[in-house]
Image (tube, rainbow, N blue to C red):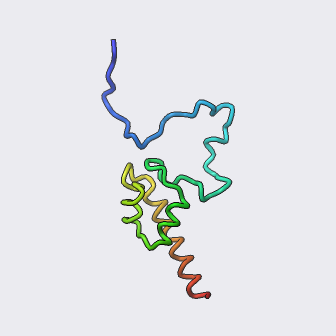
Amino acid sequence: MTIEPYFMVPQCYNLAIPANYESNPDIMNTQHANPADEVMCSCSGTKREHIRKLFEQGLDIDAISRNTGAISGCGGCEWDIAGFLEALAQQKKEKGQGG
């Protein structure tokens, strides 16, 4: 007898624990040796460095979302990406005033 689930988990939620989790507990560590490699949107797999490069090309949050698929899945990354873009804008502003 097969029991059908009465609900579907959205594709963007990766609920699977990696097979080697017990042998490598750091695999779930959110601190990265290279922050540029950090995945900011797990639905689209968009990394921090890619978002930074698109920002430097003049794209805003909506254009970045259209370009990468970030924010368009579950929306859980929206605040993190918005905060990152605000920090980049502040850095750009400070460099403009200092140089």
> Eyeballing the image, is 8 above or below 36?
above
Q: Residue 63's spot in the image, x, y percent?
A: 38, 65
Q: Residue 4's spot in the image, x, y percent?
A: 32, 22
In the shown orientation, is residue 83 left or right of residue 28? Answer: left
Q: Residue furthest top?
A: 1
Residue occupying image coordinates x 64% and y 52%: 31
Residue occupying image coordinates x 36% and y 54%: 72
In the shown orientation, is residue 78 left or right of residue 19? Answer: left
In the shown orientation, is residue 67 left or right of residue 94? Answer: left
Residue occupying image coordinates x 47% and y 72%: 57
| Badge count | 0
Q: Residue 95's spot in the image, x, y percent?
A: 59, 82
Q: Quadrant of residue 66?
A: bottom left
The C terminus sits in image quarter: bottom right
The N terminus sits in image quarter: top left
Q: Residue 9's spot in the image, x, y percent?
A: 38, 36
Residue occupying image coordinates x 61% and y 42%: 28
Q: Quadrant of residue 70?
A: bottom left
> Eyeballing the image, is 95 above or below 46?
below
> Eyeballing the image, is 43 above or below 57?
above
